[in-house]
Image (spheres, rainbow, N blue to C red):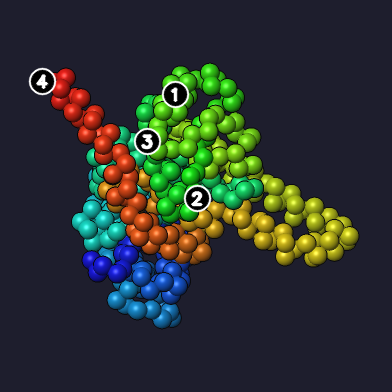
Amino acid sequence: MQDDWTIVALDAMGGDNAPGEIVTGALNAAAQNEELKILLVGDPERIRLALTGHEYDPERISIVPASEVIETGEPPVNAIRRKKDSSIVVGLNLVKEGKAHTFVSAGSTGAVLVGGQLIVGRIRGVDRTPIGAIIPTVKGIALLIDSGANVDVRPNHLVQFAQMGTIYLRDVIGVTNPRVGLVNIGVEEDKGNALTKEAYPLLQDTPDINFIGNIEAREIPHGAADIILCDAFVGNVILKLYEGTADALIGMVKKGFMSTLRSKIGALLVKPALKASLKGMSASEYGGAPLLGLNGLVIKTHGSARAHEVTTTLLQCITFRDQKIVEKIRHALGTEAASHEDSNSTKED
């Protein structure tokens, strides 16, 4: 791979708006940053049709053929094993083979998660690979981890999630010394279930994270923590409730503004400020959610992603590579992994 390019394998067939919005997002990203090279993975005929009428550098935007598509409803493991020529499998193999630094997809979440672990593989020493979603707060943003990959976890997995999330939020997003909050039903140390009770002292004793203790869900939108730490069951519930509440509130505000002549006049006056505020609540402003702990970068964007979110995600890949996040996670968890292996070796001896 050319050293000065960040090469991204982009699933052109994944998501509700593929390939049109996916290709447009790729074109916009390439136009904004010359360090980006994009491999559009999928049906060549449909991709060429989406490229028709656009000017682009064929050296930086090219097509990698893939004849199959993994649909959202397919069982992920079976789909990954059966559809070897799907856009997801082909794209992940490009990362595994060193032909791309990153794989990005708006396709089947399950297939991306399973494929990432089976094909790209976990970093040695990483027990579970969480997915981290950026969510808006009144103070800016927060990283919700795990937001969908690991429903059943152990306390030591949460510690690793906190470590990887800290590296990502600090070095990619630019949050200095991010605060880690453990989602619980109360702030007291002895609150919660067996998982949170056991994880609390482990997090307290982890030197490379800024653990601030338990936080309740109602504190999340107020920016109580920079990293919202939980298992994927809790995280996905929080994420979906977050998205649904935001949509409902925005709908209620719009309906209120249109209810009377006076409110319509008021809406015209506050529209610029309101639009700027609501823009910060949009998931498309923060790009996709990375699957952390793999031997390469894999990012899942929303299934409904449009061009702007695809562009944001692709540009974020450059920062991820420049900051050597994979290498930093490998270094951070490598000592722990080595100690664990030495301990097991000693026991076996």
Mark with earlier residue (2, 1) = 2
Pointer 1: what residue? 201
| In this picture, residue 38 sits left or right of residue 272 | left
Q: Position of residue 138 (x, y in %)?
A: 64, 48
| Label 1 crowd (10 A; few <14 / some 14-19 / many >=20) | few
Pointer 3: what residue? 160
Quarter of the picture holding the N terminus: bottom left
Q: What amino acid type should be assigned to the residue bearing mark 2?
A: Val
Q: Position of residue 217 (x, y in %)?
A: 60, 33
Q: Are marks 3 and 4 in contact (CB under 8 Å)?
A: no
Say if 88 sits above or below 158 in the image. below
- Residue at left offset 84%, top offset 55%: 259
Distance between mark 1 and mark 4 Cα atoms: 31 Å
Q: Nearer the viewer, residue 272 or 325?
A: 325
Disc 3 secondary structure class: helix
| Label 3 crowd (10 A; few <14 / some 14-19 / many >=20) | many
Pointer 4: what residue? 349
Q: What amino acid type should be assigned to the residue bearing mark 3?
A: Gln
Pointer 2: what residue? 175
